[in-house]
Image (tube, rainbow, N blue to C red):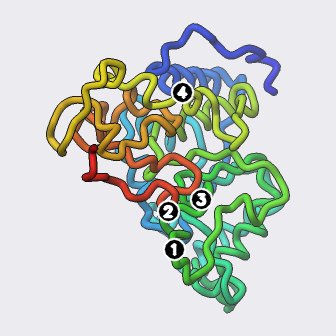
Amino acid sequence: MNQTFNSCPNFLTRLETASVLVHKAIDAVKQENISKRNLIWLELTGCSGNIISLLDGANPDFKSLASQMVNFIYDNSLMVAEGEAAMERLFGMTGGDYILAVEGAVSTKDNGLYNIIGRWKGQPVTAYEAIKKLGEQASYVIAVGTCASDGGISAARPNPAECVGIQSLLDRKVIKLPGCPCHPDWFMGTLAYLMLFGEPELDVRQRPLMFYSTLIHDICPRRPYFDQGIFASKLGEKTCMFKLGCRGPVTRVDCPIRKWNDRVNWPIGDNSPCIGCAMFGFPDKMEPFISFDTT
């Protein structure tokens, strides 16, 4: 833990947490109390939805992250380098100090050949190899999104590539930020906390409690309808969607107060039941996403 910042502020509202932590980290870098950290972002078996989500961040935003908090060493969607030059930049960090962020699951079938992320020294590089090589040496490893955390959609039945979350391949702690996609606040807030204080308090599934401690059901604006037994019988009714299959009662994350797309809306606010995308076992264990039998 950085001794300059030996206690985390406990007066923050949930919504302010990420923004305040990021601004504190930026100020600490400017004052040379801490240094910018090297960040590697790997995109593996997935849809690249998490890096897109990060680019859409607002207060804190991606520009603040990339220019004032970290040295963005590698991300195949954003960097200019390509081919061997990109791989050289990536693996040139081995033995150095860096934080590894990973989105997407890891394909394990046929020694990982279902997911090639590049070529290095004339040989194909699998996601499996990259995780094993970079994951063990990183200062911290962050699984960004549900696929990296526990397999997610990439590992859904029948899972022909035998995808797994990155923890399955690493004999070390992985900080998990599930969500499909991960909210930019969850990643930037966690990264800022790591820079200022070290590892945040985690739950039993290795998720930061500052974002994943409360059931959606307990902070949902439609909770009063549940308490009064007023349930929607079809999509579009603006009451509790529990009988339509809403997974809010089993999903721990702060979507109701944080919302999405510059805090404009979130699924239940748009009359769509929560599908539990931040939960272990998504999507298979959360199906069916909508139930039309409301009796």
First in sequence: mark 2 vs mark 1? 1
Residue indicated by mark 2: 284
Residue indicated by mark 4: 214
Residue indicated by mark 3: 148
| Secondary structure category for the residue under label 2 | helix
Looking at this rendering, what residue extends furthest in the left direction? Answer: 236
Q: Amino acid at mark 4?
A: Thr
Q: Amino acid at mark 1?
A: Arg
- In this view, 292 is above or below 274: below
> How far from the left and from the top, in percent, is residue 106?
63, 71
Local crowd size for mark 3, using a 10 Å CA cut-off: few (<14), some (14–19), many (≥20): many
Residue 241 appears in which quarter of the rendering?
A: top left
Which one is in front, 50 or 26? 50
Q: Nearer the viewer, mark 4 or mark 2?
A: 2
Question: Which residue is depicted at the point 16% across and 36% down?
Answer: 237
Q: Amino acid at mark 2?
A: Asp
Q: Are marks 1 and 4 in contact (CB under 8 Å)?
A: no
Q: CA distance from mark 4 to mark 3?
A: 22 Å
| Secondary structure category for the residue under label 3 | helix
Q: Is residue 234 left or right of residue 78?
A: left
Residue 261 visible here: no
First in sequence: mark 4 vs mark 2? 4
First in sequence: mark 1 vs mark 4? 1
First in sequence: mark 4 vs mark 3? 3
Residue 112 appears in which quarter of the rendering?
A: bottom right
- In this view, 99 is above or below 217: below
Residue 157's disc number = 1
First in sequence: mark 1 vs mark 3? 3
Q: Amino acid at mark 3?
A: Ala
Q: Are marks 2 and 1 in contact (CB under 8 Å)?
A: yes
Looking at this rendering, what residue extends furthest in the front direction? Answer: 295
| Secondary structure category for the residue under label 1 | loop
